[in-house]
Amino acid sequence: MTPKVLIVEDEEPIVTLVRYNLEAQGFKVSAAADGEEALTKIRDDPPDVLILDWMLPYLSGIELCRQLRRKPETRQLPIIMLTAKGEEADRIRGLESGADDYVSKPFSPSELAARVKALLRRSSPSFAEETLKFRDVVMNLAAHKVRRGGREVCLGPTEFRLLRYLLEHPDRVFSREQLLDAVWGRDVFVGPRTVDTHVRRLRRALNEEGRPDLIRTVRASGYALDAGGP
């Protein structure tokens, strides 16, 4: 079943950008230019994920989110708030209104798509993907295998979990502490430099035969998966 995404955004260039990237990854995409139109579309053809702009004509994204959370039929609808507001207080307000995730403009379309997929996996197991892809890297979650350019890549359990997390969040920079919490768990007491060791192992496995490095080191920040290399 093809997952459906409704974009509620009054800036047409952003709608075009998000629609193009989501449709390229297999989503069925529709759009609404304001909150009232969104309510009608949600009633007539309920989406699986809602991408909701904060600032909308007639009915704000915050108020629309609150209304949806009050209705039993839309209480569990996954919602990503998309907005130019980036201050911590604004992010907290958006999340407290009922949004499941928050993306600030300008944003990476690939990261937004990854967040849509992550929300779907959590909310609807039937949409869970068996593969994750980035450039020429393909991870088969069911078979627990990784291939790059068609060649199988041998990874240890920790490197597999680390790569999976990066594949789920392409182009996003994570600090060592964030990677430790996400990959190792909050209850595992290891030092941040442990991340460096496993990133080196992951790079060595992925970059055999002189392939370009997909893991970027961001000085004083951490690591990101992108095509720019170290």
Image (tube, helix red, strand yellow):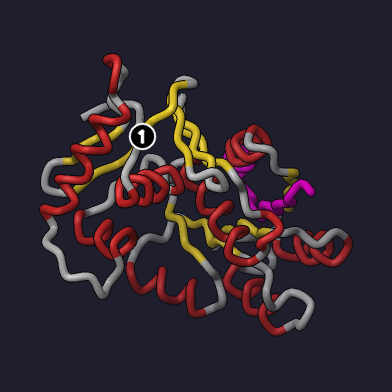
Answer few, some or many: residues within 10 Å of disc 1's Cα (few below 14, many 20 plus, some between 14 and 19).
Answer: some
Residue 142 placed where, x, y %?
57, 47
Can residue 180 be seen from the camera position used here?
A: yes
Q: Nearer the viewer, residue 171 or 215?
A: 215
In magenta, the rendered stretch is 1-15
Residue 100 placed where, x, y %?
53, 69
Relative to 93, is 209 on the left or the right?
left
On screen, residue 178 above or below 219: below
Label 1 sits on a secondary structure element that is loop
Which quadrant, please, contains the C terminus? Answer: top left
Quadrant hosting residue 143: top right
Can residue 55 be seen from the camera position used here?
A: no
In the picture of the structure, the residue carrying the numbered disc 1 is 154
Q: Nearer the viewer, residue 181 or 62?
A: 181
Relative to 212, is 147 on the left or the right?
right
Residue 216 placed where, x, y %?
25, 35
Q: Amino acid at mark 1?
A: Cys
Residue farthest right in this picture = 44
Residue in the image at 53% along x and 40% along y: 140
Q: Is residue 132 magenta?
A: no
Residue farthest top in this picture = 209
On screen, residue 70 above or below 102: below
Relative to 46, is 112 on the left or the right?
left
Residue in the image at 60% along x and 65% along y: 79
Q: Is residue 4 magenta?
A: yes
On screen, residue 138 above or below 222: above
Quadrant hosting residue 38: bottom right
Residue in the image at 30% along x and 41% along y: 224
Relative to 14, is 210 on the left or the right?
left
